[in-house]
Amino acid sequence: MLDHAPHGIRHWHELVATAATVRGYMGISPDAWEEACRILGAGHAAVVIACLLQRAETIARPGGYLRALSTRAANGSFSTGPMVMALLRAENRRAA
């Protein structure tokens, strides 16, 4: 995400603004982004975009994946914490 934030990311609103830009590069529609922001909240939607960007090479349809996660969140079966922790564990395994 920092590669796409010309002035860095120091506050949540900067993360959200950067995610809104990055989602376009990833082929995620404005509608899917707005839905995620409405259901998850803008900050959590931005975290999801950052996670999807981290795994971009393994996700064939990031827009569809974001919509699926939004649906799961609306049903109470998704939160960003476990997603972030899974990425951290994967990074630690690669670094070891």
Image (cartoon, rainbow, N blue to C red):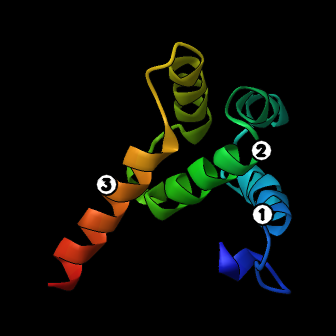
In the rendered image, residue 6, in percent from the top left (x then y), is placed at: 84, 85
Estimate the x, y position of residue 68 in percent, counting from the top left. Answer: 53, 23
Measured Cα–Cα span from mark 2 to mark 1: 9 Å
The residue wearing badge 1 is 12
User: Which residue is depicted at the point 77% across and 51% down?
Assistant: 24
Residue at far top of view: 75
Mark earlier in primary sequence (3, 2): 2
* Marks 2 and 1 close (CB-CB < 8 Å): yes
State yes or no: discs 3 and 1 in contact (Cβ < 8 Å). no
Task: Give neighbour class at mark 2: few <14, some 14-19, many 20+ (Cα, 10 Å).
Answer: many
Q: Is residue 49 above or below residue 10?
A: above
Q: Secondary structure at mark 1?
A: helix
Q: Amino acid type of disc 2? A: Ala
In this view, the residue in front, 39 or 7, is 39
Q: Position of 56 compared to 22: left or right?
A: left
User: What amino acid is at disc 1?
Assistant: Trp
Q: Which residue is mark 2?
A: 42
Mark drawn on residue 86 = 3
Label 3: which secondary element: helix
